[in-house]
Image (cartoon, rainbow, N blue to C red):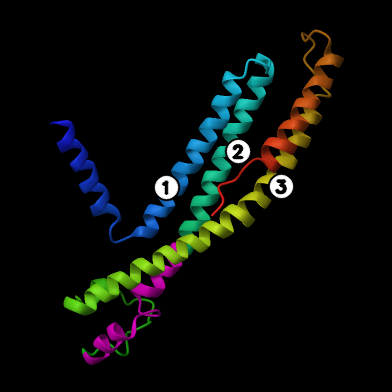
Amino acid sequence: MSRTKQAFSVLDYLYKTYHKNAGKMLIHTGVIGWVLSSAAQMAGIIMNDKIPKEQKMFLIPQEFADACFNIISFYLVTRSFTGIAEKLVNTGKWLPSNVKNHLIKNGFKDKIGKFGFNIIRDTKLTGRPKRSFELFQNGIGVIATTIGSIISCNIITPISRNKYASIRQQQNIASLNNPKPSLQNPQTHREKARAVIHHTYMQTFMNKGNLKI
């Protein structure tokens, strides 16, 4: 297969996957953004010759744990908002007026808004009502995803991450009180390690750049 055909194949797949669900696209691109940002952080640590090897062995796992926490938190919070919005639209709680009127005329008045009702599955919309419903559904998905992203990236994830970072900082500092006997100059090691841990958590975790929406 030529490169041109491969490119069109990829674009065709992306169009089929996301053209009716822009909210899903925003979630996936947000996760990709977190992954790339975290990968850049870890690459920076690995390639920084000023950071001793033993400190890198501490910093890299901590950065990886932070990345996992950020990505999972972002995905769960944002997907929850999108899922609730999708449910409200699919059951008919939220509908454009022309679609609602169409459903009422076709005998679905008593089912609109009910928990077990699904407009896509149960009504077989066609023509203009179908297009209106799909546009409305897509727009609500984008709005819900954007709101979820804002709350996740600017409120829930930073607060949760900082709480997690504080706990991990205390645990790592406490573990330095029992250094391995084989370590040379344990007192110097403890002092250096405390400085690294403090700097890592207070700066890298609590004040590093977030994905702002």
Q: Residue at x 39, y 70 (%)?
A: 87
Q: Residue at x 55, y 58 (%)?
A: 150
Is residue 108 a member of the stretch shown in magenta? no
Who is closer to the viewer here, 173 or 36?
A: 36
Q: CA distance from mark 3 to mark 2?
A: 12 Å
How far across and how far down the image is residue 168, in percent? 72, 37
SS label for mark 2: helix
Location of residue 2 with respect to 89 vertically, above or below: above
Q: CA distance from mark 1 to mark 3?
A: 26 Å
User: Hey, what amino acid is under mark 1?
Assistant: Thr
Label 1, on which residue? 29
What's the residue at 24%, 87% (across, down)?
A: 102
Question: Element under label 3?
Answer: helix
Q: Which mark is residue 163?
A: 3
Q: Residue furthest left?
A: 1
In-image side of 3 versus 94 (left or right): left
Residue interval drawn in magenta: 82-105
Q: Main secondary structure of the magenta part?
A: helix
Q: Which mark is residue 179?
A: none
Q: Which residue is labeled 2 in the image?
A: 66
From the viewer's perspective, is the residue at label 2 or at label 1 nearer?
Answer: 1
Answer left or right for 12 relative to 88.
Answer: left
